[in-house]
């Protein structure tokens, strides 16, 4: 089946490459959506913040941020005559180079009283911005589960034991703080974005309904 109707919708699976376990999203969008609009959809669905340039690589031709002097991103998806199981690439952040595979899964007709885009599912939370691409992210993720992280948790466990042993509910917790505890808390907070989190389809669809994908489409680039 090929994309050809103005009121048709297309189901896409967006997969972030170079990361395991797989980080992916499944979305339905209008078949006449432009690549620029799809950029906004990918940003919201994956969890990016649209801080950097982007590009689509479709059949050897590039379309993307106007600053990159590529093909016009206002080109609609329907222009490409995609068939089911066709794939193309979406690249976000030319420095960290987050590469996504987008696969055309199926086509359908837009349902009455239904707004698109809509997220159908996904798995795992997105890496934080500006963390050095897949390699940098994986290194930080390994560190977040390593020996130093374990030692910081041991410091926090000791801190909580001291608070409990004092049996002084009227005393502020700050009375028990030390420089060692404060440093451990800062490092634990910094590691949090690199710990595997749970994906929320509801949160993505709430943002779609609020029009966040349109805002991110126009942001900066």
Image (cartoon, rainbow, N blue to C red):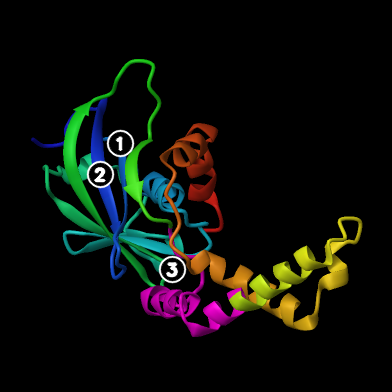
Direction from residue 67 to residue 13 in the image, left or right: left
N-term mark: 3 or 2:
2
Q: To which residue does mark 1 refer?
A: 28
Q: Which of 124 and 105 is in front in this view?
A: 124
Q: In this view, does 137 lie above or below 147?
A: above
What number of labels is visible?
3
At x 57% / y 81%, what residue is drawn?
151
Callout 3 secondary element: loop
Tell which tag, 3 or 2, sits nearer the viewer: 2
- Tell me the residue at 37%/59% (across/down): 64
The magenta segment is 126-153
Q: Is the magenta stretch mostly helix, strand or loop?
A: helix
Expressed as whole percent of the image width and height from the top left, the position of residue 69 reads: 38, 66
Q: Name the residue that disc number 3 marks.
A: 93
191 vs 70, left or right, is: right
User: For the residues carrying marks 1 and 3, which lies nearer the camera in this image?
Assistant: 1
Residue 150 image point, x, y percent: 53, 78
Residue 94 magenta: no
Q: How crowded is mark 3: few (under 14 residues within 10 Å), some or many (20 or more)?
A: some
In three-dimensional space, the C-alpha distance between marks 3 and 2, rounded to whole angstroms, equals 21 Å
Q: Cβ–Cβ below 8 Å for labels 1 and 2?
A: yes
Q: What residue is disc 2 on?
A: 12
> Does 17 appear above or below 9?
below
Report which quarter residue 106 is drawn in: top left
Residue at x 31%, y 68% (from the top left corner): 19
């Amino acid at each position: 089946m090929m994309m050809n109707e103005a009121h048709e919708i297309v189901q896409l699976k967006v997969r972030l490459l170079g990361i395991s376990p797989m980080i992916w999203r499944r979305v339905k969008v209008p078949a006449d959506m432009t690549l620029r609009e799809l950029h906004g959809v990918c940003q919201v669905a994956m969890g990016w913040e649209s801080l950097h340039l982007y590009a689509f690589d479709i059949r050897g031709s590039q379309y993307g941020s106007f600053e990159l002097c590529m093909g016009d991103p206002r080109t609609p998806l329907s222009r490409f005559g995609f068939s089911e199981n066709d794939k193309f690439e979406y690249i976000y952040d030319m420095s960290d180079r987050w590469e996504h595979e987008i696969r055309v899964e199926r086509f359908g007709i837009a349902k009455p009283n239904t707004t698109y885009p809509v997220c159908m599912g996904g798995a795992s939370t997105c890496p934080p911005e500006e963390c050095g691409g897949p390699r940098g992210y994986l290194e930080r993720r390994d560190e977040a589960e390593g020996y130093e992280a374990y030692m910081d948790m041991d410091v926090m466990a000791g801190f909580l034991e001291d608070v409990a042993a004092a049996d002084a509910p009227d005393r502020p917790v700050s009375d028990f703080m030390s420089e060692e505890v404060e440093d451990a808390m800062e490092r634990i907070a910094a590691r949090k974005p690199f710990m595997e989190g749970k994906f929320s389809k509801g949160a993505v669809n709430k943002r779609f309904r609020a029009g966040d994908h349109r805002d991110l489409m126009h942001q900066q680039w």
